Image (cartoon, rainbow, N blue to C red):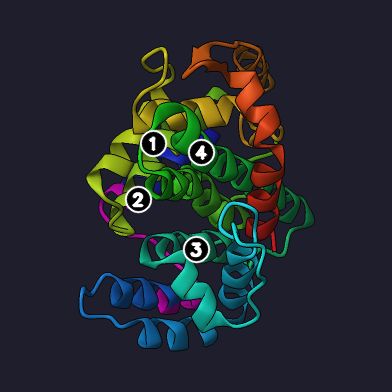
């Protein structure tokens, strides 16, 4: 079957909500639903997190990162970590587990390598988005981090299906940008019920560009994606080259410059990315 035809088939399935998720993703989606309940208590949330070892480790690591551990006091248990982070950040961590679980059943070595590289890219974009939101664009940092965590979810979903179609992702092509990022990504994001403002921000990234200087959630995501030191393995080389060129642009913001802020925030960004890569 032609590569483009496969992309279109999966995109049509995604648009109809006919998505094939691994069993562990379905279980984590139930945790996401529970956290959306306004009556969910912190004790309940902590117990649900403790039932997910990967999530537990990442929540504690994030709570001890430079971005959240301002006092320098390390946390060693999930309840304290949930209390420090708050529910908004906790939802981002749940989303990160869902995204990673999409590739958990891949057996092909090349696809597993692409999945690992795509998560590395995602972690860096998420760390940069959180810091840029706080110090440059002044949008909600937790929403920015959440948007970054899910911005490549269509890619993870496609990777989880690629073993059904040998050779589908052997080459990075513009077909992926047109039918993968936009159509498959939109279908998966809607299935995950991400907020409209997050969906719009991610779609803004797919279409490229944004207001300058950046002031919106979408522009924050575009800037973080350009600055990420690890490119998406699903993008053609020329796309990565354009983003590397965009990352060289500097501008003034709040009495400082973008590059100065990034230098001063290097430890914070590194610690956030490291916590997500746990």
- 159 lies above or below 19: above
User: Residue visible at 36% across and 27% down?
Assistant: 204
The reply to whether dot 2 and dot 1 touch (C-beta < 8 Å) is yes
Distance from the alpha carbon under mark 2 to that under mark 1: 9 Å
Which callout, 4 or 2, points to the residue nearer the camera? 4
Q: Is residue 175 magenta?
A: no
Q: Which residue has dot 3 on it? A: 93
Q: Residues within 10 Å of mark 1 (few under 14, many from 20)?
A: many
Distance from the alpha carbon under mark 2 to that under mark 3: 16 Å
User: Residue visible at 74% across and 59% down?
Assistant: 108
Q: Which residue has dot 2 on it? A: 189
Task: Provide the secondary structure element on which disc 3 rests.
Answer: helix
Q: Residues within 10 Å of mark 4 (few under 14, many from 20)?
A: many
Q: Is residue 14 magenta?
A: yes
Residue 64, horizontal then vertical, whole percent: 64, 65
Front residue of 37/101: it is 37
Distance from the alpha carbon under mark 3 to that under mark 4: 15 Å
Q: Which residue has dot 1 on it? A: 202
Circle number at residue 129? 4
Residue 57, horizontal then vertical, whole percent: 64, 74
Which callout, 4 or 1, points to the residue nearer the camera? 4
Task: Provide the secondary structure element on which disc 1 rests.
Answer: helix
- 238 lies above or below 196: above
Q: Residues within 10 Å of mark 2 (few under 14, many from 20)?
A: many
Front residue of 151/176: it is 151
Task: Tell which circle, 2 or 1, labels the residue nearer the N-terminal end.
Answer: 2
Judged left or right of residue 200, residue 106 is right
- Magenta highlight range: 13-27
């Amino acid at each position: 079957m032609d590569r483009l035809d496969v992309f279109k088939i999966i995109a049509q399935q995604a648009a109809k909500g006919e998505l094939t998720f691994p069993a562990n993703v379905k279980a984590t989606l139930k945790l996401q639903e529970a956290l959306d309940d306004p009556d969910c208590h912190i004790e309940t949330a902590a117990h649900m997190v403790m039932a997910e070892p990967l999530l537990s480790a990442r929540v504690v690591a994030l709570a001890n990162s430079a971005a959240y551990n301002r006092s320098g006091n390390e946390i060693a248990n999930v309840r304290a970590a949930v209390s420090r982070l708050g529910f908004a950040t906790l939802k981002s961590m749940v989303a990160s587990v869902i995204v990673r679980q999409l590739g958990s059943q891949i057996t092909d070595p090349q696809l597993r390598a692409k999945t690992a590289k795509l998560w590395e890219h995602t972690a860096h974009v998420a760390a940069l988005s959180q810091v840029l939101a706080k110090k440059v664009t002044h949008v909600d940092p937790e929403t920015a981090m959440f948007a970054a965590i899910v911005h490549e979810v269509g890619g993870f979903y496609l990777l989880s299906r690629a073993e059904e179609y040998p050779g589908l992702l052997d080459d990075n092509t513009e077909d992926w940008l047109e039918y993968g990022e936009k159509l498959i990504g939109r279908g998966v994001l809607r299935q995950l019920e991400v907020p409209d403002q997050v969906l719009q921000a991610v779609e803004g990234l797919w279409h490229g560009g944004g207001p300058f200087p950046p002031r919106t959630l979408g522009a924050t995501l575009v800037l973080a994606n350009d600055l990420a030191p690890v490119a998406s393995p699903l993008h053609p080389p020329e796309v990565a080259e354009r983003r590397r060129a965009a990352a060289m642009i500097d501008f003034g913001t709040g009495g400082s410059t973008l590059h100065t802020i990034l230098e001063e925030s290097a430890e914070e960004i590194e610690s956030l990315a490291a916590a997500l890569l746990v």
